[in-house]
Image (tube, coloured by chain):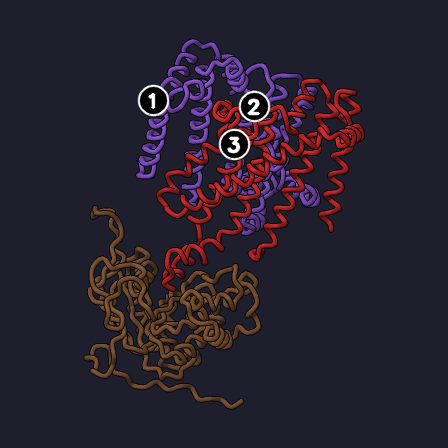
Amino acid sequence: MPREAWIRLAVIVAAVAALELLCRGGAIRHTAIIPPSEMAQALWRILRAGTFNADIVTTFRDIALAAAISIGLGFALGVGIHAWPDLRLGLEPMLASYYAVPTFILYPVFIILFGVGSGAITAVAVMLAIVAMITATLNGLDRIPSALRRTARVMRMGPLSTALRISLPAALPYLFTGMKLSVAYAVIGVIASEFILSGSGIGYSIAYAYNNFDNQTMYGLMLLVILAVVVINTGLHMVDRRLNARRGR
Amino acid sequence: MSVTPLPKPQRRPPAGEPMSQTEELHVVLKGITRVFGGRKRETQIHALGPLDLELRRGEFFSVVGPSGCGKSTLLDVVAGLAPPTTGQASFEGRAVTGVPDGIGVVFQEDASFPWLTVRDNVAFGLRRAGVDAAEIARRVDYAIGFMGLREFAGALPPQLSGGMRQRVCIARTLVLQPRLILLDEPFGALDQQTRLLMGDELLRLWRETNATVLLITHSLDEAAMLADRVGVMSARPGVFIDFVETGWPRDRDSRVIATPEFGAINARLWEKLRVESLKHMGVH
Amino acid sequence: MRQAVSVTLIVAVFLVLWQVLHLTAGTAIPGPGETLARLRALAATPAFWGHCAETGQAFLLAAVLSIVGGLVLGVLLGSHRLAGGVSEPILINLYALPKVTLYPVVLLIFGLGMSAKVAFGVMHGMIPLTLFTMNAILQTKPVYRRTASVMRLTPLQAAWTVILPAIVPEVMSGVQIAVSLALLGVLIGELFASQRGLGFLARHAMELGDMPTVLAVAATLIVFALALNAALRRLARISPRAS
């Protein structure tokens, strides 16, 4: 592992150790934050007992679905908007400021349309994640060097062939950035929605535990979310690095 | 317009002969090497040397060499931007540790500050050095006029062409009245015709400031046309394998490229350089 | 000009679609007309403006703290390549974390109230600005640093006269994001655990099934956020770097 990674590991270990000491020492109230070792134990118990298995499955299934829809639909919309410059012109300001707007406030509308549950949650998550994919698709298609397109024309390649063999590979790094962001937003969208207004899922379980003063369960589940996010992000990051390294970027 | 005759080459002592006492040594490099990488032998990169170099005060010296031979590293060592791994670099008789006073550098990349106007860009170094306002105004005005930037004095660099931006960088260096000017492929990003004209500007600058000039370039034409003396570097690790005196008079300009002497100089440079370039390309 | 026409068309299409949705979903989802009427009614009550003030106050505080904190931390981490390299993945992971899951911790520390809301806002807004600032400093064109060296500027001079002006565009982008996310954080906090503020108002209405109020509040917030974002972008464009 490179030097940076070691230092990072050391920093994280030191921070966790400091938290542990502060908690055990009494500087931080047990009712506020429990020591990290207890968090880990709580998580272990939860996974062993399987009490929240259904919620865990629900959450990850919703995340996967939201990510898939956002990526697929986002890409398709991106391609469509790219091909229609006038539409793009009109949408540009909204796409640019989309993430400044608290769109989740429309959650109740989705509840009415889809009922309380996975449908509404997935819808909110898609709303959050899809624009990142659309923007990344537009960006990627923009950045295909015109020299590549012109080579395709000189070789007399048809539109489908050009799209599959030239446009897609050339835009892939930017598309992948969009996919990374979409997954991240899908995670945030699903868990946040579950937290605020839902009856199942990890987010809901954390809120339930909090409302019932069950700190152990609450922190155990929080730890689960943190670990899941880190694993997903790291995985995507490594794929991203591979993709870029092969292109010498 | 009358036709001025082409400048005729004059005889100058070849590099091998001992330096006469009256010619002052401005820059002296002895046994310079620069090695990158860790302690392990296998990971080390021998970028430069061991090489020696002596520059006379007021000389226009050019360095040509294949890509990656360490030309830019040489500039870093002379300018004090990087310490040599072994050897000694001295400027005006004093050892170089850090950037000495009296040095100006023009880089290959555009170093003009896009957030300042041309005028403010040129004045930048003087303002930081605490020169008084009246003197700054005088020098900046002169430099802007000298480099033909008067029309654009209030413009921002992003609004200018590549050639103009390099002129801004040169003007910014000029106002500091450096005694040694280092240029690292300053015209690399420009087209051929602009390069020739910028070469003339550089010669004007050299004559005006009486500075010593060290120009790094990959263009044989440019070196042969502009310099008093050209050093040919080998493939990495770069050492000097030839010094060619051009013998041009001080008042030369780009029209020397029409002379047979220019062809001969070019031929000699390429003779040595071709072998080294093939080495760099992996062909022996 | 062409853009203004396109945008107007899109807004019109959106309003039409909204009305269609209203007509198909029945009384459950109010249409644009009803929403506007409810908004007018709300605006006549002082209670509504009280909520606005509450949210506004928390947002302002959170935005300012996010900007200051993000800049300071970004500069510190950006000044040292190793520190930046070590902290970047940590910051990115914190950014990707659904911070909502950490809200109970904040409440346990700050209790219910204004300080918790501001904490939520800062949690959301500070990290992206830190990342933007840090990366902008680390990725400053090397030739600028070399120029500063050749001119023999002191590190402080180099930082103030070369690095800082060079990173202004990226910092402006980061500030826009920080402000938007600070608003988001404050609102989520109000949705989840507060007795005052626009977020609370929306949630309260949601629980009562009062859809017109929900949409009225949503519309207010969306328009406010868009206007704020537009203002910040105009501000960024005024800077002399626009090319």
Query: Given the image, what chain letter belongs to the residue carrying mark 1?
Result: A
Give the residue at mark 2. Answer: A65
Using the rendered image, report if marks 2 and 1 lie on a common chain. Answer: yes
Query: Residue A109: x percent and y percent?
Result: 69, 24
Q: Colour of chain C?
A: red
Q: Which chain is rendered brown in the image?
A: B
- Give the label on residue C119, or none: 3
Q: Is residue B40 above or below residue B246?
A: above
Q: Neighbour class for label 2 at 10 Å: few (<14), some, many (≥20)?
A: some
- Residue type (three-letter) at the residue carrying disc 3: Ala
- Mark 1 to mark 3 CA distance (whole Å): 25 Å
Q: Residues within 10 Å of mark 1 (few under 14, many from 20)?
A: few
Residue at coordinates 56% horizontally, 38% vertically from top-left?
Answer: C61
Question: Of discs 2 and 3, which sits in the foreground?
Answer: 3
| Disc 3 secondary structure class | helix
Q: Are marks 2 and 3 on the same chain?
A: no
